[in-house]
Image: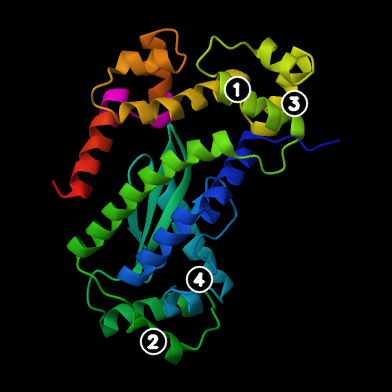
Protein backbone atom coordinates (compact mmCIF):
# COMPACT_ATOMS: atom_id res chain seq x y z
CA UNK A 1 0.00 0.00 0.00
CA UNK A 2 1.34 3.40 -0.95
CA UNK A 3 2.39 5.57 2.00
CA UNK A 4 0.03 8.45 2.69
CA UNK A 5 1.52 11.89 2.14
CA UNK A 6 0.88 14.02 5.23
CA UNK A 7 0.92 17.86 5.09
CA UNK A 8 4.24 17.84 7.00
CA UNK A 9 5.81 15.41 4.51
CA UNK A 10 4.42 17.37 1.61
CA UNK A 11 5.93 20.55 3.04
CA UNK A 12 9.30 18.87 3.49
CA UNK A 13 9.15 17.53 -0.08
CA UNK A 14 8.38 21.03 -1.36
CA UNK A 15 11.33 22.50 0.55
CA UNK A 16 13.58 19.79 -0.90
CA UNK A 17 12.42 20.80 -4.38
CA UNK A 18 13.22 24.43 -3.53
CA UNK A 19 16.64 23.40 -2.23
CA UNK A 20 17.40 21.60 -5.52
CA UNK A 21 16.03 24.39 -7.71
CA UNK A 22 18.36 26.43 -9.91
CA UNK A 23 17.23 29.71 -8.36
CA UNK A 24 18.15 28.57 -4.84
CA UNK A 25 21.49 27.12 -5.90
CA UNK A 26 22.41 30.24 -7.88
CA UNK A 27 21.37 32.58 -5.09
CA UNK A 28 23.10 30.53 -2.39
CA UNK A 29 26.32 30.53 -4.42
CA UNK A 30 26.14 34.30 -5.01
CA UNK A 31 25.24 34.91 -1.35
CA UNK A 32 28.21 32.90 -0.10
CA UNK A 33 30.61 34.46 -2.63
CA UNK A 34 29.47 37.98 -1.71
CA UNK A 35 29.10 37.73 2.07
CA UNK A 36 31.32 34.78 2.96
CA UNK A 37 28.52 33.55 5.23
CA UNK A 38 26.81 30.14 5.21
CA UNK A 39 23.25 29.89 3.93
CA UNK A 40 20.85 27.03 4.57
CA UNK A 41 17.19 26.22 3.94
CA UNK A 42 15.37 24.12 6.51
CA UNK A 43 11.81 22.84 6.34
CA UNK A 44 9.48 23.51 9.25
CA UNK A 45 9.70 20.69 11.85
CA UNK A 46 12.51 19.04 9.90
CA UNK A 47 15.47 17.33 11.56
CA UNK A 48 17.63 18.48 8.64
CA UNK A 49 20.55 20.69 9.75
CA UNK A 50 20.31 23.57 7.30
CA UNK A 51 24.00 24.51 7.52
CA UNK A 52 25.30 21.14 8.69
CA UNK A 53 27.27 20.36 5.53
CA UNK A 54 27.90 23.91 4.39
CA UNK A 55 31.51 24.51 3.39
CA UNK A 56 31.23 28.17 4.46
CA UNK A 57 30.51 27.36 8.09
CA UNK A 58 32.56 29.21 10.67
CA UNK A 59 35.45 26.86 11.71
CA UNK A 60 34.71 27.80 15.33
CA UNK A 61 31.13 26.49 14.95
CA UNK A 62 32.41 23.35 13.23
CA UNK A 63 34.66 22.60 16.21
CA UNK A 64 31.80 23.20 18.66
CA UNK A 65 29.60 20.87 16.62
CA UNK A 66 31.95 17.99 17.37
CA UNK A 67 30.89 18.00 21.02
CA UNK A 68 27.49 16.73 22.14
CA UNK A 69 26.94 19.45 24.76
CA UNK A 70 27.92 22.41 22.61
CA UNK A 71 26.15 20.95 19.56
CA UNK A 72 22.97 20.57 21.64
CA UNK A 73 23.30 24.21 22.73
CA UNK A 74 23.58 25.32 19.10
CA UNK A 75 20.56 23.25 18.06
CA UNK A 76 18.55 24.61 20.98
CA UNK A 77 19.38 28.17 19.95
CA UNK A 78 18.45 27.44 16.34
CA UNK A 79 15.08 26.12 17.47
CA UNK A 80 14.43 29.19 19.66
CA UNK A 81 15.35 31.51 16.78
CA UNK A 82 12.86 29.76 14.50
CA UNK A 83 10.11 29.74 17.13
CA UNK A 84 10.48 33.48 17.66
CA UNK A 85 10.86 34.34 13.97
CA UNK A 86 7.09 34.24 13.34
CA UNK A 87 6.47 36.20 10.14
CA UNK A 88 9.63 38.33 10.45
CA UNK A 89 13.35 37.49 10.62
CA UNK A 90 14.79 36.85 14.06
CA UNK A 91 18.41 37.11 15.21
CA UNK A 92 19.72 35.75 18.51
CA UNK A 93 23.14 35.17 20.03
CA UNK A 94 24.54 31.83 21.10
CA UNK A 95 26.38 31.20 24.38
CA UNK A 96 29.63 32.18 22.60
CA UNK A 97 28.20 35.52 21.41
CA UNK A 98 27.81 34.63 17.71
CA UNK A 99 24.65 35.67 15.87
CA UNK A 100 22.24 33.16 14.35
CA UNK A 101 19.38 34.32 12.09
CA UNK A 102 16.24 32.65 10.73
CA UNK A 103 14.23 34.24 7.91
CA UNK A 104 10.79 32.65 7.39
CA UNK A 105 9.72 31.51 3.92
CA UNK A 106 5.95 31.93 3.90
CA UNK A 107 3.52 30.49 1.36
CA UNK A 108 0.35 32.47 1.83
CA UNK A 109 -0.35 32.55 5.55
CA UNK A 110 1.87 29.58 6.41
CA UNK A 111 5.60 29.32 7.13
CA UNK A 112 7.05 26.33 5.31
CA UNK A 113 10.76 26.85 5.88
CA UNK A 114 13.53 29.08 7.19
CA UNK A 115 16.52 30.56 5.45
CA UNK A 116 19.34 30.37 7.99
CA UNK A 117 22.61 32.26 8.21
CA UNK A 118 24.86 33.77 10.84
CA UNK A 119 27.86 32.45 12.78
CA UNK A 120 29.23 36.00 12.91
CA UNK A 121 30.16 38.50 15.61
CA UNK A 122 28.82 42.04 15.70
CA UNK A 123 31.78 43.23 17.77
CA UNK A 124 35.51 42.66 17.79
CA UNK A 125 36.32 39.54 19.84
CA UNK A 126 38.27 40.01 23.07
CA UNK A 127 39.99 37.58 25.43
CA UNK A 128 37.29 38.00 28.08
CA UNK A 129 34.60 36.80 25.64
CA UNK A 130 36.50 33.66 24.77
CA UNK A 131 37.35 32.93 28.40
CA UNK A 132 33.63 32.95 29.27
CA UNK A 133 32.92 30.55 26.39
CA UNK A 134 35.77 28.25 27.43
CA UNK A 135 34.50 28.31 31.03
CA UNK A 136 31.05 27.18 29.90
CA UNK A 137 32.51 24.36 27.81
CA UNK A 138 34.66 23.12 30.71
CA UNK A 139 31.66 23.27 33.04
CA UNK A 140 29.75 21.02 30.59
CA UNK A 141 32.65 18.58 30.52
CA UNK A 142 33.20 19.23 26.82
CA UNK A 143 36.29 17.62 25.34
CA UNK A 144 37.72 20.14 22.91
CA UNK A 145 41.13 21.47 21.91
CA UNK A 146 40.93 24.93 23.51
CA UNK A 147 43.97 26.21 21.61
CA UNK A 148 42.43 25.36 18.24
CA UNK A 149 39.07 26.68 19.41
CA UNK A 150 40.60 29.98 20.51
CA UNK A 151 42.37 30.42 17.17
CA UNK A 152 39.10 29.75 15.32
CA UNK A 153 37.16 32.10 17.61
CA UNK A 154 39.44 35.04 16.86
CA UNK A 155 39.14 34.33 13.12
CA UNK A 156 35.34 34.62 13.27
CA UNK A 157 33.86 36.99 10.71
CA UNK A 158 33.04 40.39 12.26
CA UNK A 159 30.37 42.67 10.78
CA UNK A 160 28.86 45.87 12.08
CA UNK A 161 25.14 45.83 12.86
CA UNK A 162 24.15 47.81 9.75
CA UNK A 163 26.04 45.42 7.46
CA UNK A 164 24.40 42.40 9.02
CA UNK A 165 20.92 43.94 8.90
CA UNK A 166 21.43 44.57 5.17
CA UNK A 167 22.37 40.91 4.66
CA UNK A 168 19.23 39.81 6.51
CA UNK A 169 17.16 42.16 4.35
CA UNK A 170 18.55 40.49 1.22
CA UNK A 171 17.39 37.15 2.62
CA UNK A 172 13.91 38.59 3.26
CA UNK A 173 13.64 39.51 -0.42
CA UNK A 174 14.92 36.10 -1.46
CA UNK A 175 12.38 34.43 0.84
CA UNK A 176 9.62 36.21 -1.10
CA UNK A 177 11.05 34.83 -4.36
CA UNK A 178 11.14 31.32 -2.91
CA UNK A 179 7.53 31.65 -1.78
CA UNK A 180 6.50 32.54 -5.33
CA UNK A 181 8.54 29.68 -6.75
CA UNK A 182 7.02 27.23 -4.26
CA UNK A 183 3.53 27.64 -5.68
CA UNK A 184 4.86 27.09 -9.19
CA UNK A 185 6.51 23.88 -7.99
CA UNK A 186 3.29 22.72 -6.33
CA UNK A 187 1.46 23.19 -9.63
CA UNK A 188 4.17 21.67 -11.83
CA UNK A 189 5.74 18.99 -9.66
CA UNK A 190 5.20 15.49 -11.00
CA UNK A 191 7.99 13.74 -9.11
CA UNK A 192 6.85 10.22 -8.26
CA UNK A 193 3.26 10.82 -9.34
CA UNK A 194 1.18 8.21 -11.11
CA UNK A 195 0.21 8.67 -14.80
CA UNK A 196 -3.39 9.27 -13.67
CA UNK A 197 -2.40 12.21 -11.46
CA UNK A 198 -0.14 13.63 -14.17
CA UNK A 199 -2.97 13.43 -16.73
CA UNK A 200 -5.35 15.05 -14.24
CA UNK A 201 -2.95 17.95 -13.68
CA UNK A 202 -2.56 18.47 -17.42
CA UNK A 203 -6.34 18.43 -17.90
CA UNK A 204 -6.80 20.98 -15.11
CA UNK A 205 -4.12 23.23 -16.67
CA UNK A 206 -5.88 23.09 -20.05
CA UNK A 207 -9.38 23.79 -18.67
CA UNK A 208 -8.68 25.98 -15.63
CA UNK A 209 -10.43 29.01 -17.19
CA UNK A 210 -13.71 27.07 -17.35
CA UNK A 211 -16.20 26.34 -14.56
CA UNK A 212 -14.34 23.10 -13.95
CA UNK A 213 -15.79 20.39 -11.71
CA UNK A 214 -14.08 17.49 -10.00
CA UNK A 215 -16.40 15.03 -11.75
CA UNK A 216 -15.22 16.30 -15.16
CA UNK A 217 -11.57 15.74 -14.27
CA UNK A 218 -12.33 12.27 -12.88
CA UNK A 219 -14.15 11.36 -16.10
CA UNK A 220 -11.22 12.65 -18.17
CA UNK A 221 -8.86 10.24 -16.40
CA UNK A 222 -11.35 7.34 -16.46
CA UNK A 223 -12.06 6.94 -12.77
CA UNK A 224 -14.83 7.68 -10.26
CA UNK A 225 -15.05 11.05 -8.57
CA UNK A 226 -14.63 9.45 -5.13
CA UNK A 227 -11.51 7.48 -6.09
CA UNK A 228 -9.99 10.45 -7.93
CA UNK A 229 -10.61 12.79 -5.00
CA UNK A 230 -8.95 10.37 -2.59
CA UNK A 231 -5.93 9.61 -4.80
CA UNK A 232 -5.38 13.25 -5.82
CA UNK A 233 -5.26 14.40 -2.19
CA UNK A 234 -2.96 11.53 -1.28
CA UNK A 235 -0.57 12.27 -4.15
CA UNK A 236 -0.45 16.08 -3.97
CA UNK A 237 -1.41 16.91 -0.39
CA UNK A 238 -4.07 19.23 -1.85
CA UNK A 239 -7.76 18.93 -2.60
CA UNK A 240 -8.87 19.36 -6.19
CA UNK A 241 -10.32 22.79 -5.29
CA UNK A 242 -7.04 23.93 -3.66
CA UNK A 243 -4.97 22.77 -6.61
CA UNK A 244 -7.27 24.45 -9.15
CA UNK A 245 -7.05 27.69 -7.17
CA UNK A 246 -3.25 27.54 -7.25
CA UNK A 247 -3.21 26.93 -11.00
CA UNK A 248 -5.48 29.92 -11.53
CA UNK A 249 -3.37 32.14 -9.27
CA UNK A 250 -0.24 31.27 -11.27
CA UNK A 251 -2.07 32.16 -14.50
CA UNK A 252 -3.41 35.42 -13.12
CA UNK A 253 0.03 36.55 -11.96
CA UNK A 254 1.11 36.82 -15.59
CA UNK A 255 -1.98 38.84 -16.47
CA UNK A 256 -1.35 41.24 -13.60
CA UNK A 257 2.02 42.13 -15.14
CA UNK A 258 0.05 44.10 -17.73
CA UNK A 259 -0.91 47.40 -16.03
CA UNK A 260 -3.69 47.92 -18.58
CA UNK A 261 -5.60 44.80 -17.50
CA UNK A 262 -7.97 45.42 -14.60
CA UNK A 263 -7.74 43.07 -11.62
CA UNK A 264 -11.37 42.01 -12.12
CA UNK A 265 -10.73 41.21 -15.81
CA UNK A 266 -7.73 39.07 -14.91
CA UNK A 267 -9.71 37.22 -12.22
CA UNK A 268 -12.62 36.29 -14.49
CA UNK A 269 -10.31 35.46 -17.39
CA UNK A 270 -8.60 32.66 -15.43
CA UNK A 271 -11.85 31.18 -14.14
CA UNK A 272 -12.71 32.80 -10.80
CA UNK A 273 -16.46 33.27 -10.41
CA UNK A 274 -16.43 36.34 -8.16
CA UNK A 275 -14.01 39.12 -7.28
CA UNK A 276 -14.38 38.56 -3.52
CA UNK A 277 -13.53 34.86 -3.95
CA UNK A 278 -10.54 35.76 -6.09
CA UNK A 279 -9.20 38.31 -3.58
CA UNK A 280 -9.58 35.86 -0.71
CA UNK A 281 -7.90 32.96 -2.55
CA UNK A 282 -5.09 35.11 -3.95
CA UNK A 283 -4.23 36.48 -0.51
CA UNK A 284 -4.34 33.05 1.14
CA UNK A 285 -1.90 31.62 -1.44
CA UNK A 286 0.47 34.57 -1.92
CA UNK A 287 0.14 36.40 1.39
CA UNK A 288 -0.81 39.69 -0.27
CA UNK A 289 -3.65 41.25 -2.26
CA UNK A 290 -3.65 41.19 -6.08
CA UNK A 291 -3.17 44.97 -6.16
CA UNK A 292 -0.23 44.83 -3.76
CA UNK A 293 1.32 42.01 -5.77
CA UNK A 294 0.99 43.98 -8.99
CA UNK A 295 2.47 47.16 -7.46
CA UNK A 296 5.40 45.27 -5.96
CA UNK A 297 6.26 43.30 -9.10
CA UNK A 298 5.87 46.26 -11.46
CA UNK A 299 7.98 48.46 -9.15
CA UNK A 300 10.66 45.78 -9.09
CA UNK A 301 10.56 45.51 -12.90
CA UNK A 302 10.99 49.27 -13.28
CA UNK A 303 13.85 49.28 -10.76
CA UNK A 304 15.67 46.46 -12.57
CA UNK A 305 15.21 48.17 -15.95
CA UNK A 306 17.00 51.24 -14.60
CA UNK A 307 14.18 53.68 -15.29
Q: CA gap, disc 2 to disc 1?
A: 60 Å
> Disc 1 or disc 3, which is closer to the eye?
1
Residue density around tag 4, few if under 14, some if 14–19, many if 20 or more, within 10 Å: many
Vertical position of residue 20 compared to residue 109: above or below:
below
Q: CA gap, disc 1 to disc 3?
A: 15 Å
Residue denoted by label 2: 150
Q: Which tag, 2 or 1, sits closer to the chain's start?
A: 2
Q: Which tag, 3 or 2, sits closer to the chain's start?
A: 2
Quadrant of the rendered image containing residue 255: top left
Q: Quadrant of the N terminus?
A: top right
Q: Which tag, 1 or 3, sits closer to the chain's start?
A: 1
Percent x, y of residue 48 = 58, 57
Q: CA gap, disc 4 to disc 3?
A: 45 Å
Quadrant of the rendered image containing residue 256: top left
Q: Which tag, 4 or 3, sits closer to the chain's start?
A: 4
Residue denoted by label 1: 204
Quadrant of the rendered image containing residue 26: bottom left
Percent x, y of residue 89 = 33, 48
Is residue 174 shown left or right of residue 260?
right
Q: Is 129 one of the magenta-colored residues?
A: no
Say which mark, if any, is on residue 231: 3
Residue denoted by label 4: 70
> Disc 4 or disc 3, which is closer to the eye?
3
Amino acid sequence: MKEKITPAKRSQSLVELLRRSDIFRDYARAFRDTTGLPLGLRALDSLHLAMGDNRDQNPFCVLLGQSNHSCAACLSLRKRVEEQAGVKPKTMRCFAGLCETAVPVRVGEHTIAYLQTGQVLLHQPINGDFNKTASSLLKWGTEVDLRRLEDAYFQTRVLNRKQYESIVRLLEIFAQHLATLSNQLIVKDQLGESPMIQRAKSFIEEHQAEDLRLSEVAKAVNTSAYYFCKMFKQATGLTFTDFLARVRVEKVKNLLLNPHVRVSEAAFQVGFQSLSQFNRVFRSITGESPSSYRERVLASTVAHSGH
